[in-house]
Image (spheres, helix red, strand yellow):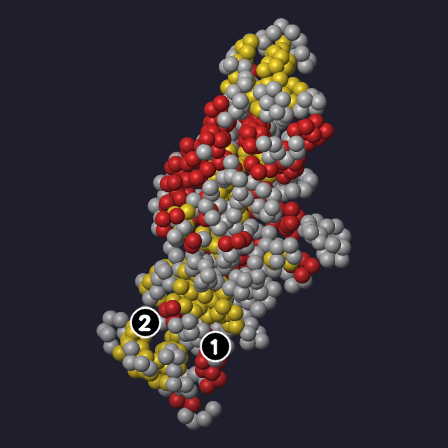
């Protein structure tokens, strides 16, 4: 060390590391340090200002300023304070090269804000509210307002925070790593909500990655990719009554008719350049519509931030942020709150199966395979061009489980529909031989993913009783909707993909051929009670050349509508909760696309208007008739009267509760043949009121039926002591209710 360098309290090498942004813990160099100087206990305060010409340390009470001197570098400053016994929070008076002056507090004054228990729980994958520590939090430390940042990047050489507040200069706010946790943190005073930022991450080879915050609560609207500091705790909720009721409810025995919605294409404002509705506009318009239509819940295609509209939200880059396309986080909280105040539940699609490769996202986050696997045989979804989470890594598992809890906690979400569960369960999902790696026992099951799914379900129900956890799972994996303590995966519902495929295949056939495929309409009852099923006619069935529901139906114009009415009414009678994708109730002719609004103009035409009216009536019947929801998942709630009339393509069944007076009888005619004197067996000698007929004129049908109902005959039929001599309308579903 030269004689001149001895004038300074820091080495030239250390200053060089700070100047080149290479230090893993800048707090050991910058900020206040107690030293012995000229035989006395003193303080030295060091600062790095790449744009500064001159810097003064300013005492807050006295306003006294101490000039700081450059040390080894014209932009590295230090000052020795031999008389300041009790070091207090101070400010820097910075004079920039361009003459601009500013006063700022020192980020390197403040102690770590992440506790040892936080680090331990995150390290073992069990910090359930890690989102309250990681990310960006506007807070007050030592009486000073600012933002606390924390990010996990264990393989980075160093990490900085960059944003408008520091001219996106990676050297100005260098973070420190907390021990061996891999968590980097820094409290930056004098900034707040609304600041735009990213993490500048430098790997061991010196490569630089600019990353959005994995735990960021808000992101810029695409095509911009930075994160935004947001306060998600200031919203005042008004849904206490809903939340209390939910906590004590049992969704298995309650009506659940779900309206599946893509917020960006449900409705747009044509007069203003076809713009999106914002969350607050959507809240009011969607509530009015959903209440009128009688749905109990809405299910939103993923609302987490995503860069590409064409992914519909299923390629997420901001797992902790509602998409900025429709407004700020507080606006989305308003949306959920308003739906709850109007007794409408909110389910969101959640995507823990994969994530995209976007440069600002989770992929290769710190210059290593951090959230994903290094081996593409484990880490790539070739079908989707995405990456698979490494469920065996504690911190990754913690990221996802805390994310699920986050949406339930901070946004009062009522349920998560977990996307692509089958792809998580199987190591060989959509892979050829040689393209996958067996588990440790030689099997095809992804043991880490299974463990993750079970733990996820155990925790969300422990924290939030009464919520919905719904699996989109398309295989025969046993016990998907059974508790983990009984060996299941722990969901409380499963999408019935098999029913949906058989159902739509059957209805796409010309009625003259349906008698040869009668088992496709009855087969689902062989396994209907193996799981807690949701019957779904979702967005996946009306895209990519599959055609809209109405367009799938065979026959002439009238028959297409009649087929769709019959299909929907049968669905409401079949055991299982219900889900219908937006637009299906209108009779859309075109496939759905995210790039335009639904064809609301169709309601100017009678057939579409009356189809919508029928769906509305079905929802209200469904909600008012306990037989349709109280015993959905037990044999006791369903009974065939006749499933063998394949020649006429007619089925007859009962939906029941433990109270005989609740019983409903469904007669479904899947051909355009009008049948008189069609006899069915019934258990009671009474009048059977016709409470619904999909062929009614009010639904644009032919208006054939039983004129309000029919009395039974004392003639045994179908192993019942009595029977009805019915008129069965063409292509119809009729519902009768005994007047007991």
Residue in the foreground of this view, choosing between 158 and 432: 432
The residue identified by callout 2 is: 104
What label does residue 515 carry, if any? none
Q: Position of residue 728 (x, y in %)?
A: 59, 18
Residue 547 in view, yes or no: yes
Question: Is residue 694 rendered to the left or right of residue 421?
Answer: left
Which image quadrant for residue 104? bottom left
Dot 2 or dot 1: first in sequence order is: 1
State the residue at coordinates (55%, 32%).
Answer: 557
State the residue at coordinates (26%, 78%).
Answer: 65
State the residue at coordinates (37%, 41%).
Answer: 284
The residue identified by callout 1 is: 21
Residue 568 in view, yes or no: no
Q: Position of residue 571 (x, y in %)?
A: 58, 30
Question: Is residue 169 rendered to the left or right of residue 668?
Answer: left
Residue in the foreground of this view, choosing between 348 and 9: 348
Q: Is residue 366 above or below residue 506?
A: below
Which image quadrant for residue 503? top right
Please identify the residue farthest to the bottom as the structure is shown.
Answer: 3
State the residue at coordinates (63%, 15%).
Answer: 678
Under tag 1, what secondary structure? loop
Q: Are marks 2 and 1 in contact (CB under 8 Å)?
A: no
Q: Is residue 497 above or below residue 656?
A: below
Please identify the residue farthest to the left as the structure is shown.
Answer: 62
Q: Position of residue 486 (x, y in %)?
A: 65, 37
**What is the spatial separation of the Cα atoms under label 2 and label 1, in whole angstroms?**
21 Å
How many marks do you count on the picture? 2
């Amino acid at each position: 060390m030269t004689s001149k360098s001895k004038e300074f309290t820091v080495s030239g090498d250390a200053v060089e590391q700070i100047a080149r942004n290479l230090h893993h813990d800048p707090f050991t160099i910058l900020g206040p340090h107690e030293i012995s100087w000229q035989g006395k206990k003193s303080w030295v305060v060091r600062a790095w200002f790449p744009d500064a010409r001159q810097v003064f340390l300013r005492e807050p009470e006295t306003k006294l300023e101490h000039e700081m001197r450059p040390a080894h570098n014209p932009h590295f400053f230090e000052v020795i304070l031999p008389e300041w016994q009790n070091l207090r929070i101070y400010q820097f008076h910075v004079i920039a090269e361009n003459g601009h002056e500013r006063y700022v507090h020192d980020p390197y004054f403040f102690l770590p804000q992440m506790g040892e228990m936080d680090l331990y729980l995150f390290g073992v994958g069990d910090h359930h509210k890690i989102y309250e520590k990681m990310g960006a939090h506007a807070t007050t430390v030592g009486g000073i307002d600012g933002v606390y940042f924390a990010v996990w990047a264990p393989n980075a050489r160093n990490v900085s925070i960059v944003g408008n507040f520091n001219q996106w200069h990676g050297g100005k706010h260098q973070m420190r790593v907390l021990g061996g946790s891999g968590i980097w943190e820094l409290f930056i005073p004098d900034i707040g909500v609304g600041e735009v930022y990213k993490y500048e991450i430098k790997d061991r080879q010196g490569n630089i990655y600019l990353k959005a915050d994995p735990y960021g609560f808000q992101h810029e609207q695409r095509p911009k990719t930075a994160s935004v500091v947001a306060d998600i705790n200031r919203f005042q909720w008004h849904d206490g009554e809903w939340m209390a009721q939910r906590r004590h409810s049992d969704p298995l025995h309650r009506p659940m008719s779900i309206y599946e919605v893509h917020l960006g294409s449900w409705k747009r404002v044509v007069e203003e350049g076809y713009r999106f509705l914002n969350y607050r506009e959507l809240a009011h318009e969607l509530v009015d519509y959903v209440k009128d239509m009688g749905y109990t819940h809405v299910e939103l295609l993923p609302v987490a931030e995503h860069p590409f509209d064409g992914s519909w939200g299923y390629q997420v880059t901001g797992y902790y942020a509602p998409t900025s396309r429709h407004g700020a986080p507080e606006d989305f909280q308003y949306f959920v709150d308003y739906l709850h105040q109007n007794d409408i539940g909110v389910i969101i699609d959640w995507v823990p199966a994969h994530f995209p490769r976007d440069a600002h996202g989770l992929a290769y986050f710190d210059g290593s395979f951090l959230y994903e696997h290094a081996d593409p045989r484990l880490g790539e979804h070739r079908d989707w061009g995405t990456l698979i989470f490494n469920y065996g890594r504690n911190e990754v598992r913690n990221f996802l489980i805390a994310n699920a809890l986050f949406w339930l906690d901070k946004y009062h979400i009522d349920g998560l529909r977990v996307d692509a569960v089958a792809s998580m369960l199987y190591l060989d999902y959509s892979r050829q031989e040689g393209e996958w790696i067996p588990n440790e026992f030689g099997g095809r099951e992804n043991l880490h993913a299974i463990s993750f799914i079970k733990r996820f379900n155990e925790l969300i129900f422990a924290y939030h009783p009464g919520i919905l956890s719904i699996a989109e799972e398309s295989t025969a994996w046993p016990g998907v909707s059974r508790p983990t303590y009984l060996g299941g995966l722990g969901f409380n519902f499963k999408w019935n993909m098999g029913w949906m495929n058989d159902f739509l295949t059957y209805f796409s056939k010309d009625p003259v051929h349906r008698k040869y495929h009668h088992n496709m309409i009855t087969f689902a009852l062989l396994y209907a009670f193996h799981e807690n099923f949701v019957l779904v006619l979702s967005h996946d069935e009306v895209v990519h050349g599959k055609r809209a529901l109405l367009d799938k139906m065979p026959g002439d114009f009238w028959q297409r509508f009649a087929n769709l009415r019959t299909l929907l009414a049968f669905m409401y009678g079949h055991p299982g909760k219900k889900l219908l994708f937006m637009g299906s109730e209108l009779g859309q002719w075109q496939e759905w696309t995210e790039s335009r609004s639904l064809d609301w103009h169709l309601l100017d035409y009678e057939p579409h208007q009356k189809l919508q009216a029928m769906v509305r009536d079905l929802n209200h019947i469904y909600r008012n008739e306990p037989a349709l929801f109280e015993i959905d998942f037990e044999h006791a709630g369903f009974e065939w009267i006749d499933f063998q009339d394949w020649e006429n393509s007619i089925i007859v069944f009962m939906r029941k509760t433990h109270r005989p007076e609740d019983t409903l009888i469904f007669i479904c005619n899947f051909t355009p043949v009008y049948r008189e004197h069609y006899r069915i067996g019934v258990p009671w000698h009474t009048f059977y009121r016709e409470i619904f007929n999909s062929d009614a004129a009010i639904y644009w049908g032919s208006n054939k039926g039983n004129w309000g109902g029919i009395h039974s005959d004392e003639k045994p039929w179908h192993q019942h002591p009595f029977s009805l001599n019915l008129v069965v309308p063409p292509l119809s579903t009729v519902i009768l209710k005994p007047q007991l």
